[in-house]
Image (cartoon, rainbow, N blue to C red):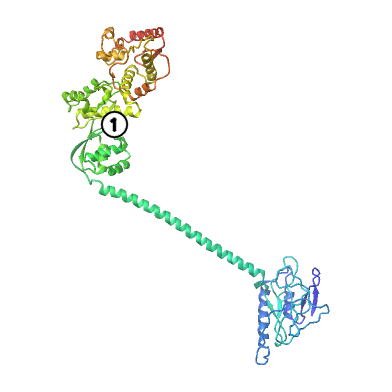
Amino acid sequence: MTCWCDAKREGVCNAVSEQDPQSQSGAQNVRPSGLPSRRDIIRARQEAAAKSRMQRSAAPVRDGVPPRASSSPKTGADSSDGQLNASSTGDVPTPDSRREQGASGSGNATRPGVPTPVRSTTPAAPAAPSVEPQQGRAGESNIPTAANAREVPKPAGSAGGASPVLMDPLTTGVRSRRIEVERKRLRRKRRNAKIRSFFILLTVAAVLAGCAYISFKLLWKDGSVQVSDDYPGPGTGSVEFVINPSDTGAIIGANLVKAGVVKSEEAFLVAWNDNADATSIQPGTYQLKKQMSAVQAVAALLDETRRSSNAVTVIPGASVKDVTEKMKAFAKFSDEDVDAAVKDPAAIGLPAEANGSLEGWLAPGTYEIHVDEKPAQVLERMVKGTVTTLEELQVPREQWHTVLTKASILEMEVNIDRYLPQVARVIENRLANPAGETAGFLNMDSTVNYGVGRSGGIPTADDLEKDTPYNTYIHKGLPPTPIASPSREAVEATLKPADGDWLYFVTVDLDSGETKFAVTKDEHDANIVLLRQWCEAHKDKC
């Protein structure tokens, strides 16, 4: 046996049997880098396994009982003279050698100087020398070969003595535990990934199912509307249908159901929304059929050949006389029916605040007249429009008549809307200061013209001297009734007049509507000169 020591590890020797060609070949086959090749590792393992089988087959049988292999003895250092100490119980000590725990971390090194006995039931036999794995430089491997594999002696009594059995450190120790921990971590990671994938798929499936359900309900609803809530068309008979300027698609659909043209509002609204041109349907009177499909009804309303205009338009500043003349011009209304409707306040829904006078209560707008509609019904819609405006502007009911009277004067005096708040302030200042220069007189030409039956222009000297209830040059305060139908803008200006001390105003240009305002009478007289100059240049308009 030859021994040599590593200079870097004092007291640690690697012993290789000179008679063991396998050990020698293994030591010689170590590559310069200190790492054995894969071929050397496989050959070393095969040779060790073959040698172990041969030794077991040659082991003698004592008393009919084959020898039992003992566990691998642990090595340790005993006394300094290297003698083996055996106890009375048959413990077999290991060879005397000092071992330190190497940098390779094989996990089988013990503390130096502590003997580790191995109990055996067979007589003690010389222990075979063991070959420690090379603890070389940094980067050297502990992969076992014939040179660096740990040899475990076989039980004594076997043929050929206690031949060593190579054990692979790759299958034991810290490395095995690390591999097992890594495998558990990977298994746990795969399990968690599967769980997450399951819940993600479940969520996606739930969302898709919800979308499919909603889509089905919507499609089913649309289909049911088309099938069960609509007529198949094309319709029968003839019916006259009226669309007013303010009618929306929903109002038109509701009126079509009442007239028996379509079966349901839902079916008509579906057809209305599906047709991009439906919003261009014009007010008027249409010749339709009963029990038409919703699609055909929309198409008929877009057909200009089916529409005729049977409308009465009330413009801002129009009087009751102007409106009734338009209604009498309508071929299906007689003069007697129109006059009777004007004289029946209850039939037309005139509020008590009007004091029985219809003037000023006919809201501006265009009103389509049905073929079977009566004059009282048309006038009722006009009055209802004025009441709606007053309610929307939150005018107290007891002030309805006064507000309409002031607003009607503004409507007739002002041609440009931007002057409305200023003229409203002039009216308020004159009424609020009866001791001022105007002495409580409004002095409005528009009221004088209304009293003499004129609708505009500058009153003459005779008109100004004529005593009528509407001559505000003679009578203080407001006239007894409104003098025309005011616009919504005139009503709003009456409720919110501009700030100022003006007592006078005059329109100096009847074409452009230019108006001058003054605080004193002298300033007002200078503005009147401007008006007279304009009238001299435009005698046909004054």
From the image, which quarter does the C terminus lie in? top left
From this view, report whether residue 239 is shown above or below residue 403: below
Residue 497 left/right relative to 469: right
From the image, which quarter does the N terminus lie in? bottom right
Could you say which quadrant of the image residue 522 lies in? top left
View extreme (bottom): residue: 63
Q: Residues within 10 Å of mark 1 (few under 14, many from 20)?
A: some
Residue 310 is at least partly visible in this image: no
Residue under the image location 30 percent in, 39 percent down: 250
Residue under the image location 21 percent in, 24 percent down: 342
- The percent coordinates of residue 528 (x first, y second) are 37, 8
From this view, report whether residue 266 is shown above or below residue 510: below
Question: Amino acid type of disc 1?
Answer: Pro
Residue 250 left/right relative to 191: left
- The percent coordinates of residue 80 (x first, y second) are 83, 77
Could you say which quadrant of the image residue 135 lies in? bottom right
Secondary structure under the numbered disc 1 in the rendered image: loop
- The percent coordinates of residue 21 (x first, y second) are 74, 80
Identify the residue under disc 1: 245
- The percent coordinates of residue 2 (x first, y second) are 80, 78
